[in-house]
Image: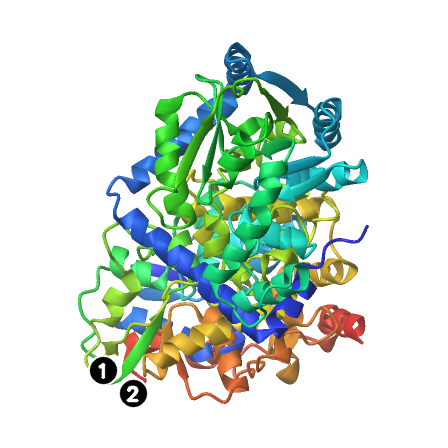
Amino acid sequence: MRVALMVPCYVDMFYPEAGVATLELLEKLGVEVDYPFDQTCCGQPMANSGAVKQARATEELFVRNFAAYEHVVAPSGSCVHHIRNKFTAAADTAERRHVSAHVWDLPEFLCDVLKVEAFPWAEFPHEVTLHVSCSAIRGLFEQSMSERPNDPWFSKPRSLLEKVKGVEIVDFDRPDECCGFGGTFAVTEEAVSAAMGNDKLERMGASGARYVVSADLSCLMHLQGCAHRNREEFQFLHLAEVLNGKVQ
Amino acid sequence: MKPIDQARNALAFLEDDTHEHAFDQLIWGLRERRDAAAREVPEWEQLRTLASEIKEHTLSNLARYLELFEARAKRNGVQVHWARDAHEHNQIVYDILSSHNVEWLVKSKSMLTEECDTRAFLGQRGIEVAETDLGERIQQLDDEPPSHIVGPAFQKTPQDVADLFHRVYGSDPNRPDPVYLAQVMREQTRPLILDAQAGMTGANFAVAETGAVVTVTNEGNADLSANVPKLLICSVGIEKVIPGVEQLAVFIRLLTRSATGERITQYTSHFAAPRMGGEMHIVLVDNGRSQRLADERFWPSLKCIRCGACMNTCPVYRRSGGLSYGSTYMGPIGIITMPSVDIHRHSELPYASTINGSCSNVCPVQINIHEQIYEWREVMGAKGEFSATKKAAMKVADKLLSNPRAYRVAAEAGGSALGVLPRFAIYNRLNAWGRRREIPSPAEETFHQWYARNRTGAAQPPETPAETTEAKAVDDERA
C-alpha cells in the first residue's frame, strides 16, 4: 500500500521527530510512504479565522499535492478534521472531494485501515496521561464523548497506546474538556487560553503521571508552553513516537 | 460603536482568581449534574432528536401555530398583542399598565424583557419594576445585567451577596450563608409582591393547543408574580410556541435535566386565563426572530429552549464570566444569536470560542452551535469585519502558505522559522502567545530537511532571500 504523508507546518518546524516517527512507524507496518515535497499547510489557520478567500490558494495547493494518492495520512487530528470536513475554500472539484474523503488521522489509519493488532518493537514503561483533542473526539469521532453518556465507550488512540508494552495510562479529571489551544484563539484570547491550559495541566499533574501523550501536537505545543512557563516537569510526546518504539 | 472586546473583559474576570475559580467550579458542577441526569434516561439521545424535530416542525409552520395559539388564548379570555420589535413590546406593556394606573410592578425572570430593556423603559415613565427571581433581583440591586440565562447572579460568591445585601438592606455582612441570605431576600421581596398592582412573566413555552403560557421555575416567584396582582402580562418570543401538551412533555423532560441536572423543577405552571375579576395579556414579540428564521444558515438557533447547557459546558464561558460578552445572551448561544441583532457590535464574539464542539453535543434541541460559530466567522470575513492587523496577517499567510518556495525559505531560515505558525501568534503586535506561555523552539532541522537528507539523497538548497519579502511584511507590521 502506498500513502502520502502530510506533515503539518508546525510539526515540520517544531516537532520534526513526530514526523519521522510517523514515517518510520508506517514503514515498519509495511506501508510505502511518499512525502510530497511541495506541501506547506492545510489552510486551517486562515479558514478557521473566517478568511475563506485567503485560504483558497493554500487549500488548492494541498489538493494538487495530494490528489494522486489513495490515502493521505497526517499525525494531526485538527488538520485532518479541517481537510475532511471544512475544506470549502478550495474549488469543489473531484480532486478536492477525493482528498477530503481519503485523508486519515494517524490513529484512524492504524485502527480502521491497517487494523494493527500489535507494536512488538515498542516498550514504554511509564505512567502516561493521554490527551485526545476536541477535533479527534467531536470532529472525527475517534473516541466517545462525555457529552453523550449513554453511548458505548470506545477510543481509537487509547486502544493503540494500550498495545504498547509497559504503558500505564492514568485517568484525570475532565478528560475531554478543551485544552484551550483553539488555533488563533490561543492568541486572540490568550488569557483564557492559558487559563484553560493551566487547568488541564493541573488535572493531568494530579494523576501523578509526568508524560503527556497525544496525536495532536498543536494541543501539546500549547500545553508545553504553559508547563515550561510554570517550570513544571512534564514530557510531551506524540502518540507516533511511543508506537514507533524509539522513545524510552 | 466599537465591537465588544470579549477578550479584554475576560481578562479582567480572570485576574480575579477567587471568582474565576469559584465560577468554573460552580458551572462545571451543573454540567456534571446534567451528565448524570442524562445517563438516567436511556432514550436521552432519541429525546434530543425528537425535541429538535418538534422545534423544526413548529418553526417551519410558525404562522399557523401562532394563529392557533392566539385563537385559543382569546377563547380563554386573554387579550393577545403582537409586537414587531422591542420598542413596540415596551410601548404595549406601558399602555396596558398606564391604562390601569399601575406604578408598581413585580416581574419574574424573562430574557425577552432583558432583550427589550423593558425595566429601563418603564422606569423612565414612572413605573417601578421589582424582579422577584432571587438571582435576577440580586443583579437588579447591583445594577448589572444577568451573567447567565438560568442563574443571573452565578458569578457572585455568597460573600458578594452578603456585602450587597448589607449595602442595600443593612443585613449582616458577616453571614455569607445562602439560607440566611435567601431569608433576607424573602422578607424584603414578599411585601413588594403583596402590594404590586400588576405582575409580569416571560414564558418557557407557549402551547398552541391550549393557549397557555408555561413557566418552569424553582422559587415559585413566577406564580406569585402572576397570581397575586389582578393584572398579568406575559411576554412571549414567537419562537416559544409548540404544538400541544404532548410535545411539551418532551421538552419538560429535557429542559431541567439539561439546565441543572434536576429531573423536574418545583413548579411547572400553565397560565391559561385571567383570574376571576382580573385581566391577562400576552404580548407576542418578533424582535428580529422572523428575519433570522429566513436565514438559511442561522435559523436553527431559534430552536433554543434557554436551558443554558451550552454555557455550562463552554470552557471559555466558565473562565470569562457571562458579563464579558457584553450582550443580552452570552456564551455559545449568545455568540450565534447576537450578531444577527447587530453584526458590527458583536463581530468579535465568534472568536470567543475554541470551536471544540461540546456545546452542540449537550444542546437538548441539537442546535449545531459550534458550526454556526465557525460560519459566523466566515460572515465576518466576507463582510470585512476584521481588524487591520488580522487582515494583514491573513494576507501574508495566504501568500506564504500557498507558495512552497517562499514557505520553505521562511520555515528554514534559522530563527525566522518562527515566521509561519507563530507569525499568526504574534500578528497583533504584542507577543500574545508568549505572555503566559513559552514559545516553542524551532528544531535544528525541519522534517522537510531531514527527509531530504535521509530519504532523497540530495538536500534542497534554500531559495533566494528575495522570497522572504512576505515574511518581512509582517515583521514590519509588528514593528
Q: Tell me the quarter of the image containing the C terminus of chain B.
A: bottom right
Check chain identity for marks 2 and 1: say if they share one.
yes
Mark-to-mark CA distance, 2 and 1: 7 Å
Which mark is on residue A123?
A: 1
Task: Identify the chain of the residue marked 2, using the numbered disc in the image.
Answer: A
Say few, some or many: other residues with alpha carbon within 10 Å of mark 1 (under 14 / 14 to 19 / 20 or more): some
Q: Name the element at disc 1.
A: loop
Say which quarter of the image contains residue B399. Answer: bottom right
Which percent across, then down, holds residue B96?
70, 23
Determine the chain carrying the residue at label 1: A
Q: Nearer the viewer, residue A10 or B316?
A: B316
Nearest the eye: B319 or A172: B319
- Marks 2 and 1 close (CB-CB < 8 Å): yes
Residue at x 39% of width, y 42% of height: B265
Task: Work out whether residue A107 can be spotted.
Answer: yes
Residue depicted at 80% across the width and 73% down the height: B476
Residue A42 in view of the camera: no
**Residue type, mark 1 in image:** Glu
Q: Which residue is mark 2?
A: A248
- Residue A112, image x, y percentages: 26, 55
The reply, left or right, for residue A27 in relation to residue B410 is left
Q: How is the image coloured?
A: rainbow
Q: Secondary structure at mark 2?
A: loop
Q: Of label 2 and label 1, which has the lower sequence position?
A: 1
Q: Nearer the viewer, residue B33 or B228?
A: B228
